[in-house]
Image: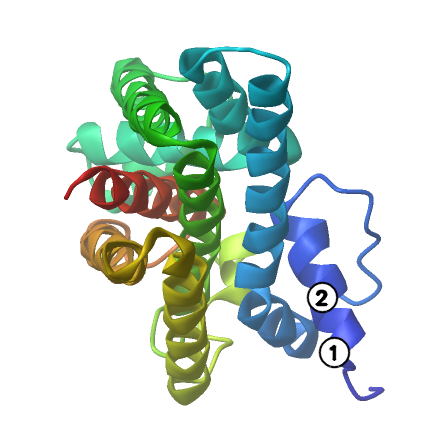
Amino acid sequence: MPRTSPADGIRFAFGTLTALPVRVTRWDREAARGGMQCAPLAGLVVGLCAAGAGGVLTALGAGPLLAATATAATPAALTRGLHLDGLADTADGLGSAKPAEDALRIMKQSDIGPFGVITLLFVLLAQVAVLFQLYERSWTEGALGAVVSATAARLALTLAARAGVPPARPEGLGAAVAGVVPRGRALLVTVLVVCGAAAAGAPLGASGVVRAAAAVVLALGAAEVLLRHCVRRFGGVTGDVFGGLAETAATAALVVLALG
């Protein structure tokens, strides 16, 4: 097997975690390792696109609510709703209170149940509400929210793919990426993202630095709680669980940025 290049990992990250026209040239554990380590990079690009959408509307005279809606919609469009769908399926599986095998079967169905609908409703409302609050303060704060939340969302996937986290099924995206990232490498990526978020918050002063760094850390904490619950409940992770983790982290990051 040829040695994996950094480009293979980047293509894997963008090809599996976004709807951008990137062709995945390798689909193996080595490429998956590089891809999941590069997941925050994919999140950064998605976040910059979301901030750009909000910025264009703001420049054209739109109010903060429309800018917030566009900013929240952009990540959904750039993933074809994949993470939102995963969140809904995970909510249906957890809410079913059925044994793991039956819950996983529910999650695989194409329809969305009541738990999924309710979860999507409140998560999207929370995201738009926070972004509205941030854009009311300034476009800079809204853009910071878009970038930090999208990057933290994909960083949560890097940590969920760390060694020791098992797959719930023998097939699918969850099985392809579960346990591929060494714990030390996952920690290093986390430190880099937290430092990058703090630097991004610097234009807003000391408060911005602290809030941006705290947003990433607390978002990872929220995702970790969900991850551990899913591993106990389902026996491991699935592609749907990864989607649920991303949306949970993104929402938690935004809520932290709205405080203070």
Position of the N terminus, as image quadrant, is: bottom right
Say whether residue 182 is left or right of residue 6: left
- Please report the residue visible at 18 percent of the width from the left and 52 percent of the height from the top: 229
How many discs appear?
2
Where residue 6 is drawn, which disc sits there?
1
Q: Residues within 10 Å of mark 1 (few under 14, many from 20)?
A: few
In the rendered image of this protein, does residue 82 appear above or below residue 160?
above
Q: Position of residue 65 (x, y in %)?
A: 41, 13
Q: Position of residue 201 (x, y in %)?
A: 38, 56
Near-viewer residue (75 or 238): 75
Residue 182 appears in view: yes
Say what amino acid the circle numbered 1 marks: Pro
Q: Position of residue 257 (x, y in %)?
A: 27, 44
- Please report the residue visible at 31 percent of the width from the left and 57 percent of the height from the top: 205
User: Are the residues tagged 2 and 1 within 8 Å (C-beta)?
Assistant: yes
Say what amino acid the circle numbered 2 marks: Ile
Q: Quadrant of residue 60?
A: top right
In the rendered image of this protein, does residue 119 appear above or below residue 45?
above
